[in-house]
Amino acid sequence: MVRGRGVVFLPPFQEAVLSLRAHSAKLVARPVGRLQGRMRAPGDKSISHRALILGALALGETTVRGLLEGKDVLATAAALRALGAEITDDRDRGLWRVRGFGVGGGREPSDVIDLGNSGTSARLLAGILASHSFTSIVTGDASLRRRPMQRVIEPLMRMGARFEGREGGRLPLAIVGTDEMVPIEYRLPVASAQVKSAILLAGLNTAGETTVVEPVATRDHTERMLRHFGSEVRVAADDGGGRRITVVGWPELLGRDIVVPGDPSSAAFAVIAAAIRPGSDVTVEDVCVNPLRVGIFRTLRDMGADIVFENVREVGGEPVADLHVKGGALTGVEVPADRSPSMIDEYPVLAVAAACAKGTTRMLGLAELRAKESDRLASVSAGLSTNGVEHEMGAAELVVHGTGAPPAGGGLVATQLDHRIAMSFLVLGLAARQPVMIDDGAPIETSFPGFAQLMNGLGARIEAA
């Protein structure tokens, strides 16, 4: 484990700091025939986080419509309030208002910032906290406290911040910020939109130009939204085949109106649930189809899925479409490693589609799955095993052998506090021969409030066990 300059590893620093794990709530999904109807996926989680964060760093008022009101995004809102932003919501109108403190503003939080299960909140806010001259203590639930933060800590230390925490940079973490950050050019060792965004956000309160070089293009919501708020951001090709993203420090960001489109990662659950049930006909409305986010739909089309992008338009600088999917037979494919940045969160539910397809599906380049809310690669493998799906797991790959017939099902899946594992295996239960149960449905609220109700509205059978 790398121990970077300036990091002090404390003793197991109050492991009793609050874990927000909800009481266990088992759910079961029962086999169904076809799914039919229309639904709207919840607001995009990545865009929702960034809308609140940049609204807080702007002057004046930002209005946000379509915000994802899941636990992860609400954790970001609470943290920004602790830093001095005024954030109010009018849920009857679906409208949130943010009155920001400006790029160089904000106050020292009076208490520990608890981010629950939200890794996005932890990594993006680290960039802001590191570039302000006060000390913050950040923690999270049991799952988040296991997730590594070293990849964010290392570049922010180069810029001048200090960190004090557990071995490996895990939470709880004290961030000793400074308003005298120095700009850097940083080449990401692993493609990560969260690490990229943390550095760019720190660069806003840093004199000069801060540059991130990414080996493979990752989701670019931060760059798009920075421009929308008035920041100077330059994107150019890198000689190594990746991209160079540069932000100019000390901009005056101004409040803007934001409309958050539907989350493609959340839409994927309904799309795949329909694709694996012959005769299904489902439309998921208003989904963000940013080219750097649609790897899952490209892969499903490669497998033979009937998916059409309808009513394509642009909303708030992001391409949006209605996804119309019809169920039918799928065939196994090889998913190349270079596609993983555009669909890293969707591999668990893709494994479900692969279990229902005919032939072998080989998914490559999955190392990043081991650093998510759980070790998602291991969690998916365990869930497939307990439901009778033949597969092999490697260090960074998953090979699923589908028969073209419904999988056996009948298993109890350990979700490991991971919302995507929970929803993925509930989708499997809709197509399996026997019901599939998950040990805890509570984490689903972090990203997809009302998941069971929306899916049941299409004809699913998801209920308390």
Image: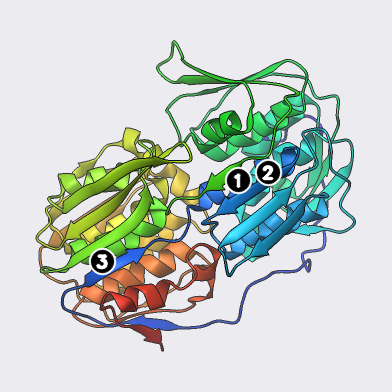
Q: Amino acid under label 3?
A: Ala
Which residue reaches farthest top? 239
Determine the residue positioned at 29% across, 55% down: 350
Q: Assess disc 3: are there few (<14), some (14-19) or many (≥20) residues with their C-alpha within 10 Å of its C-alpha.
A: many
Where's the C terminus, which quadrant? bottom left
Q: Nearer the viewer, residue 48 or 99?
A: 99
- Position of residue 24 measured from the top left corner of the image (x, y, whole percent): 55, 81
Mark 3 vs 1, N-terminal side? 1
Determine the residue positioned at 24% across, 43% down: 298
Where's the N terminus, which quadrant? top right
Quarter assignment of residue 37: bottom left
* Nearer mark to the viewer, of 2 and 3: 2
**Disc 2 element:** helix
Q: Amino acid under label 1?
A: Ala
2 and 1 marks in contact (CB < 8 Å): yes
Mark 2 vs 3, N-terminal side? 2
Residue 273 disc label: 3
C-alpha gap between disc 2 and disc 3: 35 Å
> Mark 1 — residue?
51
Total labels: the figure holds: 3
Q: Amino acid under label 2?
A: Gly
Q: Nearer the viewer, residue 278 or 420?
A: 278
Q: Nearer the viewer, residue 319 or 417?
A: 319
Q: Assess disc 1: are there few (<14), some (14-19) or many (≥20) residues with their C-alpha within 10 Å of its C-alpha.
A: many
> Mark 2 — residue?
55
